[in-house]
Amino acid sequence: MNEITTRILQGLVVAFVVMLAVSMIFNLFNRDYKTETAVYGAVSESESFQGVYVRDEIVAGYSGSGAVRYCVADGAKLGVGSVIAEVYGSEEQIDLRRLIAEKQAELALLNKIENPGTSENAQPSNLSALIGDQYRALMKLREQGSYGSIVEEKSELAVLMSTYQKITEENVDFSGRIAALKQEIAALEAKKTEPREIITADESAYFISYIDGYESELTVDTMASLTPQQLAEINDDGALTTDHKGVIGKLVDGYAWYIVGIFDNTTLRLSEGDRVDIRPDSASDTMRAEVISLASAGNIGETQIIMRCETMTYDTVQHRTERVEIVRKTVEGIKIPRSAIRFMDIEETVVNEDGSQYQTTNRYMGVWVLVGENAAFKKLNIVYETEDFYLSELNAGADYIALYDDIIVDGVMADGN
């Protein structure tokens, strides 16, 4: 081989090495990943229908004059002697008590943060992890639409974050605000006057603060005789009763109430005595109910159903009729697009009962997620599968996909490159 040929070959090798290096650097810093956020998902075997709420209701009255302060929320469960409402001479007394309650809630929160046991036994690393867990719990509640539970979780998150701030920053001190709140509450308490009238429950019941005119028409004794036409004519505008003077609301006799409607039983194939979950349109969470009666008149697609429920909420008592979903089975998880699925062989150490160990290689289904600028493999624990996506178990562990991870759906091969 002559000198010219050698130099040409050397030049080609150098050019190849340079091109390879440039290509590697370009790929390292210019990967065009397409990602999707790992979000909460749920699938249900369900059927919806227009439900009518039937309750044995007793109208509760008062003198009819003065400003009413309700002591319980709609849907609250009452015992005998429970205070339903107080009547005052003016709205100022009601506003005063509302302000006191707000300041007492703030004081309770600050006292919890300032409690020596809260901060002395807390470590920044542990608090940081708990804050992350609490934040994810809040996000899950938001995804599920469980807004009623968010207030309590939000308060706990505020305690964790304030405690973290207190033990990591020496100048953080809430004692001054606590002292000021105590003084403000004492001053407000001095302005309170006794109520003119106190309304209490004579029996165990649920409470609803309004009447709609159906109290005597829709009862447990009459619900079985309701026809499809009658059910269709029942409205939810509360306009049947115009004279509410002297009415404080109504008590639902006992703790049970009922849902009546016409639905298609072809898919669910419910039977009397079955216990199912129900989800009214107004409610964020499901409730348990028992199927009391089914009447199809030979057409299972138009089955008249009566269900009994013992869980009442603020949202459901605001309605007389609304769409209700019967949920036979619900599976929750993290939604994973099929296009993101990859497999990886992972070498693991297995420990026997006698303490001996050996190495084995297992193949796992998973996805690649974007962590900073790098791709990392996360395992999946599949709990449900459809033609379009999988559901992976929530909170399966550190090596598994987590809510709000950035899933790489395009731009990564099975080995992560």
Image (tube, grey):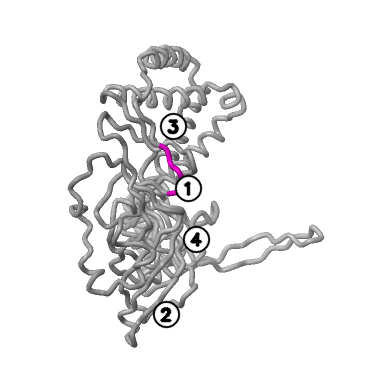
| Closer to viewer: mark 3 or mark 4 | 3
Q: Residues within 10 Å of mark 3 (few under 14, many from 20)?
A: some
Give the amino acid type for the residue marked by disc 2 in the picture: Arg
Q: Residue lying furthest right in this view?
A: 354
Q: Secondary structure at mark 2?
A: loop
Q: Is residue 375 visible?
A: no
Q: Which residue is mark 4?
A: 393
Q: Image height check: is 376 above or below 296?
A: above
Mark 3, residue position = 158
Q: Find out whether the residues at labels 3 and 2 contact each other: C-beta distance under 8 Å.
A: no
Q: Which mark is residue 11?
A: none
- Front-most of 94 and 182? 94
Locate residue 355, reporting x and y percent.
Answer: 79, 57
Question: For the point 44% across and 15% down, which residue is it?
Answer: 182
Which tag, 2 or 4, sits closer to the chain's start? 2
Question: Which dot marks residue 269?
Answer: 2
Does the residue at mark 1 contact the one at mark 3 (Cβ under 8 Å)? no
Q: Check disc 1 and report the residue beneath it.
A: 204
Name the spot of residue 185 as percent of width and height, x first: 41, 17
Residue 266 x %, y %? 36, 82
Question: Which comes sooner in the sequence, label 3 or label 2?
Answer: 3
Q: Which segment is the magenta one? A: 200-205
> Label 3, label 2: how many angstroms apart (C-alpha)?
47 Å
Of marks 4 and 1, which one's residue comes earlier in the chain?
1
Residue 201 highlighted magenta (yes or no) = yes
